[in-house]
């Protein structure tokens, strides 16, 4: 049985503070931990928690939307998870070097009508010296799926 969502929250907050930051240059171990932390945070569907991983002036391109700063990121995530119901994500480390990580991902969700989707994409991440993401570029495609085709629970 998995611990409740809140059990991870305090651990992740501590992990992202100055006491134990994951900073660059990345190693295979640290890049893998960064990706897992991102997956865990996004699966919490808590914009406040997710925003902690990004610099205050972080820049995003998400599909065709351009965002800057934590407040815009949090507003975006609230809109996203209001639309993408029962969202569940898996991220995979694709590559890394110095202060950058490339990730592939897929996530599943349904809309208000009950239509399920699997969204596929790639992200390019760039980090500052404190280990916060200062730039995120995401390319995402959506495919309709039937409920029996789901594979992320």
Image (spheres, rainbow, N blue to C red):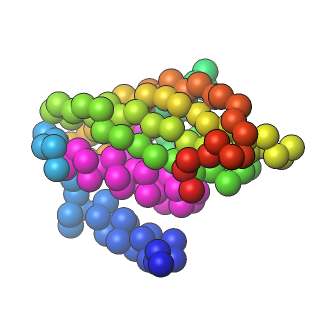
Residue 119, percent from left and from top? 59, 34
Residue 118, percent from left and from top? 61, 36
Does the stretch in magenta take in 54? yes
Q: Residue furthest top?
A: 64
Q: Can residue 145 be seen in this view?
A: yes
The residue sitting at 37% across, 66% down in the picture is: 13
The residue sitting at 62% across, 46% down in the picture is: 150
Q: Relative to residue 17, is residue 57 drawn left or right?
A: right
Q: Relative to residue 104, is residue 118 drawn left or right?
A: right
Quarter holding residue 21: bottom left
Q: Which of 141 and 10 is in front in this view?
A: 141
Residue 116, percent from left and from top? 72, 41
The residue sitting at 46% across, 46% down in the picture is: 90
**Which region of the structure is painted magenta?**
30-59
Q: Is residue 75 visible?
A: no
Q: Which of 16 and 96 is in front in this view?
A: 96
């Amino acid at each position: 049985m998995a611990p409740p969502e809140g059990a991870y929250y305090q651990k992740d907050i501590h992990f992202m503070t100055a006491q134990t930051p994951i900073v660059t240059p990345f190693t295979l171990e640290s890049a893998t931990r960064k990706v897992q932390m991102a997956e865990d945070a996004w699966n919490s569907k808590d914009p406040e928690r997710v925003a902690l991983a990004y610099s205050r002036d972080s820049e995003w391109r998400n599909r065709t939307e351009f965002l800057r700063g934590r407040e815009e990121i949090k507003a975006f995530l609230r809109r996203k998870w209001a639309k993408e119901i029962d969202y569940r994500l898996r991220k995979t480390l694709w590559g890394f070097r110095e202060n950058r990580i490339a990730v592939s991902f897929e996530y599943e969700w349904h809309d208000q009508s009950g239509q399920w989707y699997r969204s596929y994409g790639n992200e390019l991440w760039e980090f500052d010296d404190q280990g916060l993401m200062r730039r995120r570029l995401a390319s995402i495609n959506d495919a309709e799926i039937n409920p029996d085709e789901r594979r992320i629970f």
